[in-house]
Image: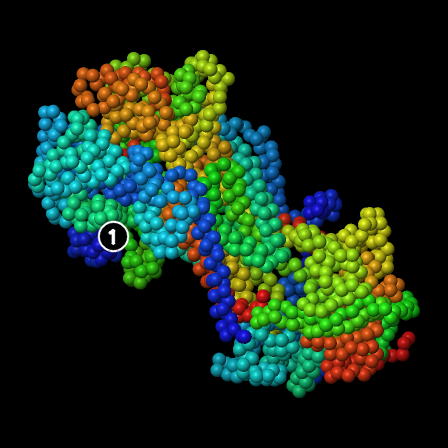
């Protein structure tokens, strides 16, 4: 892509519509409201191929905007304003229709007849098969995510004919269908990809890293890593309604203060992922969408490897000592949802949910007195530098509050690079903040990652036999299964009793729009530019 | 055995001296990056990788080898011009650097020009009126400039000139999105736009450059002004200036043709130091102004333990440093005929 | 011996006169010493004088603009910015003074050795120093802190390391021009050993030009620490430190809470300015020839 | 032609106004050469700068009359002065090397002046510059035009300075110590050239110098200045034969010349009789086949070539030669500051060349060989008080306790005539003569057997030189030391040496007893050295 888009044909393609205008050195006309949207973000897109090793989260948006999947989620009105994806509504994207066999082990897809890739070639079941094979074969995150839906081996996927594609499952799972709508199983133009594959690189990783070959709503017009990514509309898209804007520029601006100034002045139409504080303050100046992130919580983790935290009273004391309200104000600026002061008895399976704890220093002291650590102890509270905007004020407030019940906390900042290793892989941080969110919006999915021993986000080294078996038995059963609700409620009870993770609040994903509308929240927390339009 | 080209000889000798420096830089940057915390293999493996895939990646990246072997591989790649691939941008480091270096250089050079335009006249002014209030004022002004943390100045300037007054364009890099970047010839937008005769773009690029350049220039005023003053003072009291005055040469001729040219020698050395210093200070300015230069690149790379990117950055800076020193030597030789003839 | 001489000079009332004359000669030097005095007082007594605990958070009064109660306003956790700025003085001065002292000592030793004995040792040391100089210094400091961890000691070490070449080069040059001076020959004739000549006869004479460098570096060390804080490799929270306060406050400027960054920034700037302006005065104080 | 009446020059310094020139009046006739003679700080240079109005910003000129050829210089604007400088009045300075712009071709520098005064245009400037070079007798002027000052010798540089000064045919030339720092033979050549040029062009000249002898040879009239005042003026011959003012007399006496005795340099009343020193037959120091090589850019350079000589106990040997002849290298080797490349140095029957120079400070012989350095300012540690400087050798090389050291310092100080109240001063608070005394005191405090004197008076005024030389003579007799007296000035050497060695280009040209070398030199070089020294008129009969 980089090679082919020289400035000349960039102008040619870009200005095709404006050809009547005198030749423009600058693009004011092109950037005019209805045609182009400018989005700013603080993140860097480091690859155009989600399957590649090392691709960061910010890059997932390319998979969303430039590629299609067989299925997609529907849309609903969101809590914090604007729209949100709807986990409960599955819609077709490249698939025209799909049928699940009665035993739930075979899913048959019909692919839209008029679906074409950007180069004009038809989307076939072979392309789907190749893409799925790739997703389960390359290892790393894509394969792990596929596995969550029971998609493990290439032999599960068959291209029956040009327009028919089947998936065979080893056991039925409620997660399979939703898992086909996440960004990972996107469909690649296999012909182009194979042409650029080598024996050393059979999956064309090097090529697709820089040159997307899809059928999605937008093509990548230009990509300067660390600077910007320019999307251009694919007018032949069949995956959904044709996008309203011709071009979207995603500009990377690291300084959040600058991003705020830009959106406030209307120089950009959308600022993605703004800090909570800006969201709170900008709310009456521009359109701000603060969507509580589904299945995501900011939590305080007590590592079982650290001796005092093996004492249940210590954990409860902490849970009562945390200044929830202050944290919610100072770290989240009131954005998101509160997760404290909930009912004692659990009736429903809403998740994230309020814990039964609340700030009560007397109760906290009581628990401390009951524990083996009456005189308190010292513990480092670790936070990640990369997430310091919320972790730092939170940690400082916790530090101050815990000092009142005799726990001496030192705040330890860990560089972003070592955070993952220390917190999640080696799980060696005694006391730390954590922010896991599950893509698939079911509580059992969250528990699978965050409460099962050895799993990545269980950074507290928590192990509870009942949870282990509960998660295993619940993960794949449908939500309308009669066992489902009691199992989930039991998990909640244990989690709140054992407190390996003390919920603080449910964070919000904040987006400010000034001159654009149609923003839609997605669980993957990346920007879907397809529904956007300018005002 | 008389040397026919003593100057050339001296220049070659000087560049030969920089070879151990380059070797040193390669070694130190290698050791430093390996000492960085965090495991790139884990990072590379992605969000939900398991032990096995991390291990595979570690082998694929050669991180399972001993440091000694890794260094050998690194050096042999280096000799083949392979600087590795950056984790955070996903691009070959060499590509990243060739793209970003001009951005940093353009900014640094422009800010230095700006700084020279202010500080050298100030220094001369202070030198011609030593110990007067003008002198003190100049000194105070330039020192105040160097006392400001660049990131603070940068944000302040953005706040005032962009947010409040609206004079400046939005601080989002080298070119506002309404302009198309010019064809890459040199990578310097000002030059490239001028070559292709696109003056709209040229002005657009200038507008983006002003604030960051001023921020950096403020920071570099002091050393240049200080050195100009000191050097001018000593030259103005020197005997050949007196001779020139006694021969009736006009003040202008004495000041600019006799004194200034001599006074420039130490100023040029200072300029060289300031230049490499400013390239370092760029790190923060680039971050504030979303400038796609190598400074911001290095910061990001360092924070995520991106070995190849950090090493590539350091190496390119070291090469710049060597080239810069050579350049200074050359300028010295042009200005000062004595260089190259001195016996040791 | 050097210390003895300095003490001896200080004891001497002539030195005090000398000091006063230097202050009177140059209004800027006078201003600088006045400011230095102010900062030293704040550094020593600051923690006992401030109205609030610099670490105490109170989210009810977060982000309040300057008022009588809170001279410099409050930050996002309701901490008193004034108290934090004042208390930070000690830490910031400590970082810069220790870092500069360290690089001064190491640089002086290396530079003296290279400048006095010359030869292969000189070439070897010079190349090492060149290598350090070839790094963009701030990035080197970042690298060191990132590799060793961001503790105050490591910030001091990193700042010291990147400053060593400046001292070493300066001392080397100053020693080199004095190596063949006749007072050095005279000292040899007087039976001084080589080390003694270097340490007692040559080195003290390099002090006046070194003082300018010291003062510039003191300021620069603070800026360096502030820069490290800005990219998140600085002092750990909640320790009050100017750089980290400016860095954190910088994000609040656009939203109108200017006092968060402005006051620590102002203090930072004043401290750096003070050190920078101190140079000429310090040089004159250390120069015996300026005495009347 | 030039009429100066009641000229005052005041400098406004931080410590208040300082009068550098006080109320002086003189005039200059056409074609006349006027000498202004005085020691450092007498205001002679300031006078010349005042005439050109090239003082610093802080200098203020006041005069009743300051008229040059009918132009009132005092009230002339800077623009008018610029036209006068170089065109009407020119000036040449001391230190020719630093008087030229180091990074500009000399031809261009001459052109600058020519163009400035419209004496040449773009087309003929080069040719005129070459002519100007020719006029000052520079060989191969076409090529020299492209030279930079560093490529020329000191004498050549001074010729170029002359060429610049004379390029526009000015009518008055002010020469401010034009030959200071030049070798004696060069000095003569340059002075003769200036004299020729002035007379042939019928110019007037003011010749400023500290050297009365030199002034007497070239000037028609002489003004003697002291502390900003004119103390005496008159025809050259009269000044010498019948000096009126005591200061003039002092200067006249102190000027070394052939046939003078060391005591006769001193005019003062307290002149006591010269004490004779005894020379023993025993050899104290013997130099055998000494050579020294220095590494150079194009291979080693031999600074000292196979020299041999002896110094007897109590003898004073003079080592004479022009700059670069190897005399300083020789003295540095003998004082064990540097290593000899070849040869032996036998001191008191020990071959001291076998001890490494680096570790010689630990050798017991160290205290027997001491040295007095050329520049008294540079030879004192600027941070050491007089007491520290003098006691330093005692601390290092003797076992004395601090009390003994103190009394020894006081003893030596009085021996060299250093007032005790100066003991706690720093070097910059001392005068040149006082510093010289400190240097000597430091050297003799260990009672060395041999004292190496490296041009000890070269940077001193003549009157102080006279005193220091006499002090040295007295000390020699009192302490029975041998001297190796290194100097460029045969007259000075002859005054106190028993034996003279003449060196040129690292080789000993001639050696012999003083009288013999001075009265009947064998070698041409020695003869030329003697001939080049200025010959002031004979003194009046001693008063």
Assess disc 1: are there few (<14), some (14-19) or many (≥20) residues with their C-alpha within 10 Å of its C-alpha: few
At 51% from the left and 48% from the top, the residue drawn is C162
Q: Mark 1 lies on which chain?
A: A
Q: Is residue D406 left or right of residue C194?
A: right
Q: In this view, does A414 lie above or below A408?
A: below
Q: In which quarter of the image is residue D187?
A: bottom right
Res B216 seen here: no
Q: In this view, does A340 lie to the left or right of A142?
A: right
The C terminus of chain D - image quarter:
bottom right
Q: In which quarter of the image is residue A335?
A: top left
Q: Is residue C244 above or below residue D539?
A: above
Q: Residue at label 1?
A: A2
At 74% from the left and 59% from the top, the residue drawn is C189
Q: Position of residue D259 (x, y in %)?
A: 85, 78
Label 1, secondary structure: give it. Answer: loop
Q: Is residue D494 above or below residue A171?
A: below
Q: Quadrant of residue A126?
A: top left
Q: Where is residue C28 in the image (x, y as percent from the top left)?
A: 60, 49
Q: In this view, does B116 lie above or below D205?
A: above
């Amino acid at each position: 892509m980089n090679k082919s888009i020289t400035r000349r044909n960039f102008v040619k393609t870009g200005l095709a519509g404006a050809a009547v205008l005198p030749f423009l050195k600058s693009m004011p006309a092109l950037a005019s409201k209805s045609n182009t949207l400018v989005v700013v973000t603080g993140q860097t897109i480091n690859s155009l191929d989600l399957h590649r090793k090392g691709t960061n989260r910010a890059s997932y948006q390319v998979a969303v905007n430039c590629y299609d999947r067989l299925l997609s989620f529907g849309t609903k009105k969101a809590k914090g304003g604007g729209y949100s994806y709807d986990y409960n509504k599955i819609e077709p994207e490249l698939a025209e229709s799909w049928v699940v066999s009665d035993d739930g082990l075979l899913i048959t897809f019909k692919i839209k007849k008029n679906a074409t890739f950007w180069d004009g070639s038809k989307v076939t079941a072979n392309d789907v098969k190749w893409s799925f094979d790739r997703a389960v074969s390359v290892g790393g995150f894509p394969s792990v995510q596929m596995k969550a839906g029971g998609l493990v081996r290439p032999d599960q996927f068959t291209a029956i004919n040009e327009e028919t594609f089947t998936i065979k499952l080893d056991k039925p799972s409620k997660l399979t269908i939703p898992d086909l709508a996440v960004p990972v199983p996107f469909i690649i133009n296999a012909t182009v990809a194979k042409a650029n594959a080598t024996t050393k690189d059979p999956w064309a990783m090097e090529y697709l890293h820089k040159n997307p070959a899809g059928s999605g709503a937008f093509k990548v017009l230009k990509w300067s890593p660390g600077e910007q990514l320019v999307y251009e509309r694919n007018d032949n898209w069949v995956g959904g309604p044709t996008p309203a804007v011709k071009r979207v520029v995603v500009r990377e601006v690291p300084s959040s203060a600058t991003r705020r100034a830009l959106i406030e002045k209307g120089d950009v139409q959308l600022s993605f992922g703004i800090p909570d504080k800006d969201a709170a303050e900008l709310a009456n100046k521009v359109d701000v969408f603060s969507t509580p992130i589904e299945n995501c919580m900011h939590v305080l983790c007590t590592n079982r490897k650290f001796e005092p935290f093996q004492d249940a009273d210590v954990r409860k004391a902490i849970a009562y000592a945390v200044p929830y309200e202050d944290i919610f104000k100072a770290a989240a600026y009131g954005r998101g949802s509160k997760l404290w002061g909930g009912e004692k008895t659990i009736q429903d399976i809403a998740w994230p949910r309020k814990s039964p704890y609340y700030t009560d220093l007397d109760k906290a002291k009581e628990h401390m007195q009951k524990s083996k650590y009456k005189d308190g102890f010292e513990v480092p509270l670790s936070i990640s530098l990369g997430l310091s905007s919320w972790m730092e004020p939170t940690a400082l407030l916790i530090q101050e509050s815990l000092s009142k019940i005799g726990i001496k906390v030192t705040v330890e900042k860990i560089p972003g690079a070592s955070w993952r290793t220390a917190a999640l892989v080696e799980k060696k941080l005694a006391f730390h903040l954590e922010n896991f969110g599950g893509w698939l919006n079911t509580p059992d999915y969250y528990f699978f990652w965050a409460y099962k021993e050895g799993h990545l986000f269980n950074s507290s080294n928590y192990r509870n036999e009942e949870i282990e078996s509960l998660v295993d038995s619940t993960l794949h059963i449908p939500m309308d299964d009669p066992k489902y609700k009691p199992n989930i409620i039991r998990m909640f009870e244990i989690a709140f009793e054992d407190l390996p993770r003390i919920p603080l609040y449910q964070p919000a994903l904040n987006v400010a729009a000034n001159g654009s509308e149609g923003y839609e929240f997605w669980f993957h927390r990346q920007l879907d530019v397809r529904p956007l339009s300018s005002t | 055995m008389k040397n026919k080209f003593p100057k050339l000889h001296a220049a070659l000798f000087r560049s030969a001296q920089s070879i151990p420096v380059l070797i040193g830089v390669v070694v130190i940057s290698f050791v430093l990056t390996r000492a960085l915390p965090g495991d790139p293999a884990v990072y590379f493996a992605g969000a939900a990788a398991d032990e096995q895939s991390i291990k595979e990646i570690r082998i694929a990246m050669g991180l399972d080898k001993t440091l000694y072997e890794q260094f050998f591989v690194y050096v042999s790649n280096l000799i083949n011009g392979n600087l590795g691939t950056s984790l955070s941008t996903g691009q070959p480091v060499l590509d990243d650097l060739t793209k970003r270096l001009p951005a940093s250089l353009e900014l640094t050079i422009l800010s230095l020009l700006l700084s020279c335009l202010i500080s050298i006249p100030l220094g001369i002014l202070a030198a011609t009126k030593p110990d007067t209030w003008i002198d003190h004022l100049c000194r105070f002004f330039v020192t105040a400039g160097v006392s400001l943390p660049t990131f603070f100045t940068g944000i302040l300037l953005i706040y005032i000139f962009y947010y409040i007054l609206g004079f400046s364009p939005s601080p989002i890099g080298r070119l506002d999105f309404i302009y198309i970047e010019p064809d890459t010839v040199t990578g310097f937008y000002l030059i490239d736009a001028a070559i292709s005769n696109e003056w709209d773009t040229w002005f657009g690029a200038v507008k983006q450059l002003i604030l960051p350049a001023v921020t950096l220039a403020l920071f570099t005023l002091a050393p240049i002004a200080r050195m100009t003053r000191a050097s001018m003072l000593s030259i103005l009291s020197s005997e050949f200036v007196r001779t020139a005055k006694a021969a009736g040469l006009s003040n202008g001729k004495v000041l600019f043709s006799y004194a200034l040219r001599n006074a420039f020698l130490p100023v040029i050395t200072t300029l060289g130091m300031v230049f490499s210093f400013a390239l370092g200070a760029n790190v923060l300015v680039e971050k504030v102004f979303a400038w796609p230069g190598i400074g911001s690149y290095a910061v990001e790379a360092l924070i995520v333990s991106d070995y190849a990117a950090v090493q590539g950055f350091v190496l390119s800076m070291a090469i710049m440093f060597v080239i810069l020193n050579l350049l200074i030597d050359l300028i010295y030789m042009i200005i000062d005929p004595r260089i190259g003839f001195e016996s040791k | 011996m050097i210390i003895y001489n300095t003490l001896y000079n200080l004891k001497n009332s002539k030195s005090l006169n000398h000091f006063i004359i230097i202050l009177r000669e140059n209004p800027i030097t006078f201003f600088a010493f006045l400011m230095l005095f102010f900062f030293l007082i704040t550094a020593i007594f600051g923690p006992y004088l401030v109205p609030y605990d610099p670490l105490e958070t109170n989210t009810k009064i977060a982000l309040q603009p300057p008022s009588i109660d809170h001279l410099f306003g409050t930050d996002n956790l309701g901490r008193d910015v004034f108290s934090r700025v004042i208390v930070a003085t000690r830490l910031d001065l400590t970082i810069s003074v220790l870092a500069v002292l360290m690089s001064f000592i190491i640089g002086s030793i290396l530079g003296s050795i290279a400048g006095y004995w010359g030869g292969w040792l000189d070439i070897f040391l010079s190349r090492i120093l060149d290598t350090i100089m070839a790094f963009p210094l701030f990035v080197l400091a970042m690298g060191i802190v990132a590799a060793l961890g961001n503790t105050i000691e490591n910030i001091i070490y990193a700042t010291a390391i990147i400053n060593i070449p400046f001292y070493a080069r300066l001392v080397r040059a100053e020693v080199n021009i004095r190596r063949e001076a006749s007072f050095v020959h005279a000292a040899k004739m007087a039976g001084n050993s080589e080390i003694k000549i270097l340490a007692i006869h040559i080195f003290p004479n390099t002090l006046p030009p070194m003082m300018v460098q010291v003062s510039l570096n003191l300021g620069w060390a603070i800026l360096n620490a502030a820069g490290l804080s800005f990219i998140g490799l600085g002092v750990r929270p909640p320790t009050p430190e100017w750089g980290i306060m400016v860095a954190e406050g910088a994000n609040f400027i656009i939203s109108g809470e200017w006092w968060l960054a402005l006051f620590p920034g102002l203090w930072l700037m004043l401290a750096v300015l003070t050190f920078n302006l101190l140079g000429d005065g310090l040089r004159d104080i250390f120069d015996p020839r300026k005495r009347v | 032609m030039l009429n100066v009446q009641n000229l005052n020059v005041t400098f406004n310094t931080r410590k208040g106004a300082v009068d550098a020139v006080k109320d002086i009046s003189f005039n200059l006739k056409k074609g006349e050469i006027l000498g202004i003679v005085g020691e450092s700080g007498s205001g002679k240079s300031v006078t010349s700068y005042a005439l050109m109005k090239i003082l610093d910003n802080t200098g203020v000129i006041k005069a009743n009359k300051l008229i040059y050829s009918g132009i009132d210089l005092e009230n002339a604007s800077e623009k008018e002065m610029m036209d006068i400088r170089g065109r009407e009045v020119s000036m040449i300075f001391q230190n020719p090397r630093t008087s030229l712009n180091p990074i500009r071709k000399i031809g261009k520098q001459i052109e600058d002046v020519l163009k400035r005064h419209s004496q040449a245009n773009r087309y003929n400037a080069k040719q005129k510059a070459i002519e100007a070079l020719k006029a000052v007798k520079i060989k191969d002027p076409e090529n020299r035009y492209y030279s930079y000052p560093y490529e020329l010798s000191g004498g050549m540089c001074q010729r170029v300075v002359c060429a610049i000064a004379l390029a526009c045919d000015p009518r008055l030339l002010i020469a401010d110590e034009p030959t200071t720092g030049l070798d004696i033979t060069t000095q003569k050549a340059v002075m003769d050239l200036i004299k020729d040029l002035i007379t042939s062009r019928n110019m007037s000249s003011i010749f400023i110098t500290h050297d009365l002898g030199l002034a007497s040879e070239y000037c028609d009239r002489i003004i003697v200045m002291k502390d900003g005042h004119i103390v005496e003026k008159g025809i050259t011959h009269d000044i010498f034969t019948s000096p009126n003012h005591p200061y003039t007399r002092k200067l006249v006496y102190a000027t070394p010349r052939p046939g003078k005795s060391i005591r006769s340099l001193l005019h003062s009343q307290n002149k006591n009789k010269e004490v004779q020193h005894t020379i023993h037959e025993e050899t104290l120091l013997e130099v055998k086949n000494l050579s020294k090589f220095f590494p150079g850019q194009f291979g080693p350079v031999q600074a000292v070539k196979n020299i041999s000589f002896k110094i007897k106990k109590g003898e004073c040997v003079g080592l004479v030669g022009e700059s670069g002849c190897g005399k300083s290298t020789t003295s540095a080797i003998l004082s064990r500051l540097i290593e000899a490349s070849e040869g032996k140095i036998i001191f008191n029957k020990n071959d001291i060349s076998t001890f490494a120079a680096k570790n010689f400070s630990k050798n017991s012989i160290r205290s027997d060989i001491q040295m007095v350095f050329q520049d008294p300012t540079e030879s004192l540690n600027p941070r050491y008080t007089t007491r520290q400087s003098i006691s330093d050798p005692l601390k290092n090389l003797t076992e004395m306790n601090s009390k003994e050291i103190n009394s020894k310092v006081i003893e030596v100080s009085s021996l060299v005539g250093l007032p005790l109240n100066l003991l706690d001063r720093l070097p910059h608070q001392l005068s040149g003569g006082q510093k010289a005394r400190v240097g000597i005191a430091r050297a003799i405090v260990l009672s060395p057997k041999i004292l190496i004197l490296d041009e000890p008076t070269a940077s001193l005024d003549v009157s102080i030189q006279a005193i220091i030389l006499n002090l040295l003579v007295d000390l020699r007799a009192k302490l029975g030391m041998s001297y190796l007296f290194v100097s460029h000035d045969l007259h000075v050497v002859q005054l106190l040496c028993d034996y003279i060695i003449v060196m040129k280009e690292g080789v000993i040209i001639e050696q012999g007893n003083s009288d013999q070398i001075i009265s009947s030199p064998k070698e041409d070089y020695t003869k030329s050295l003697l001939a080049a020294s200025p010959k002031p008129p004979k003194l009046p009969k001693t008063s």
